[in-house]
């Protein structure tokens, strides 16, 4: 009888251990799934759609069509310089991404009605196309020329100096 009691106790302990492992696994999955499919802070993205129904896809930084880098995923954006996009993750959970330009001197950006996009500077001239002159590591940086506009991001402490691509 003692042998069966130990065997039953062992089976019960294994059953409890399996139940605990399943419970912890489910908790971990439900806790961390919210941001599992959303781009991480620091990753570059391409964006299409609208600000409330965006299609955001991860992309390699420095690409010709990549304009934005994720600067935050909690919606705490610099409202004057960052774009806030709500991304649906796993069919229902929403993540509020803050996006700021991922640009280098010489890049051109065309202002759009729903979003901006990188464009070829040589074939896109005009007042709605801005050319990046410099990127400064300070939100208080001054641009070198009076013809340049300082596009400052105070939360991320960076300034992008732009001028019309005419």
Image (cartoon, rainbow, N blue to C red):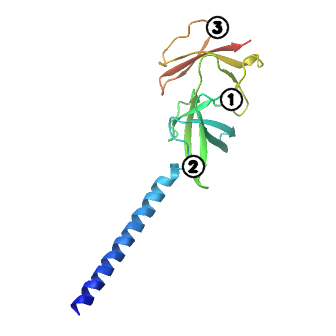
Within 10 angstroms of label 3, few (less than 14), some, or many (20 or more) residues? few
Q: For the residue labelled by badge 1, is the local secondary structure a helix, a strand or a loop? A: loop
The image quadrant where one finds the C terminus is top right
Question: Is label 3 in contact with label 2 (beta carbons under 8 Å)?
Answer: no
Residue at left offset 64%, top offset 8%: 147
Within 10 angstroms of label 2, few (less than 14), some, or many (20 or more) residues? some
State how far apart marks 1 and 2 are (Cα). 22 Å
- 40 displayed left or right of 7: right
Q: For the residue labelled by badge 2, is the local secondary structure a helix, a strand or a loop? A: strand
Q: Which residue is mark 3?
A: 147
**Upstream in sequence: badge 3 or badge 2:** 2
Q: Position of residue 73 (x, y in %)?
A: 51, 41
Q: Quadrant of residue 2?
A: bottom left
Residue at left offset 66%, top offset 16%: 131
Residue at left offset 51%, top offset 41%: 40
**Residue 94 — which label?**
2
Judge whether 141 appears above or below 82 on screen.
above
Judge whether 59 appears above or below 31 on screen.
above
Q: Position of residue 162 (x, y in %)?
A: 62, 15
**Upstream in sequence: badge 1 or badge 2:** 2
Question: Is label 1 in contact with label 2 (beta carbons under 8 Å)?
Answer: no
Name, please, the residue furthest toward the top.
145
**Residue 116 — which label?**
1
Q: Position of residue 51 (x, y in %)?
A: 65, 39
């Amino acid at each position: 009888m003692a042998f069966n009691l130990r065997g039953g106790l062992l089976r019960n302990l294994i059953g409890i251990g399996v139940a605990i492992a399943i419970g912890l696994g489910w908790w971990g999955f439900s806790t961390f799934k919210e941001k599992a499919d959303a781009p991480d802070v620091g990753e570059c993205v391409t964006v299409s759609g609208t600000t409330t129904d965006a299609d955001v896809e991860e992309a390699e930084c420095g690409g010709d069509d990549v304009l934005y880098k994720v600067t935050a995923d909690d919606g705490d954006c610099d409202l004057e310089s960052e774009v806030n996009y709500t991304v649906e993750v796993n069919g229902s959970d929403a993540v509020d991404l803050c996006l700021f330009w991922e640009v280098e001197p010489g890049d051109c950006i065309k202002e759009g009605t729903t979003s901006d996009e990188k464009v070829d500077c040589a074939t896109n001239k005009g007042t709605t196309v801005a050319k990046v002159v410099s990127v400064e590591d300070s939100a208080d940086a001054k641009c070198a020329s009076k013809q340049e506009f300082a596009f400052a991001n105070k939360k991320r402490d960076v300034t992008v100096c732009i001028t019309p691509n005419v």
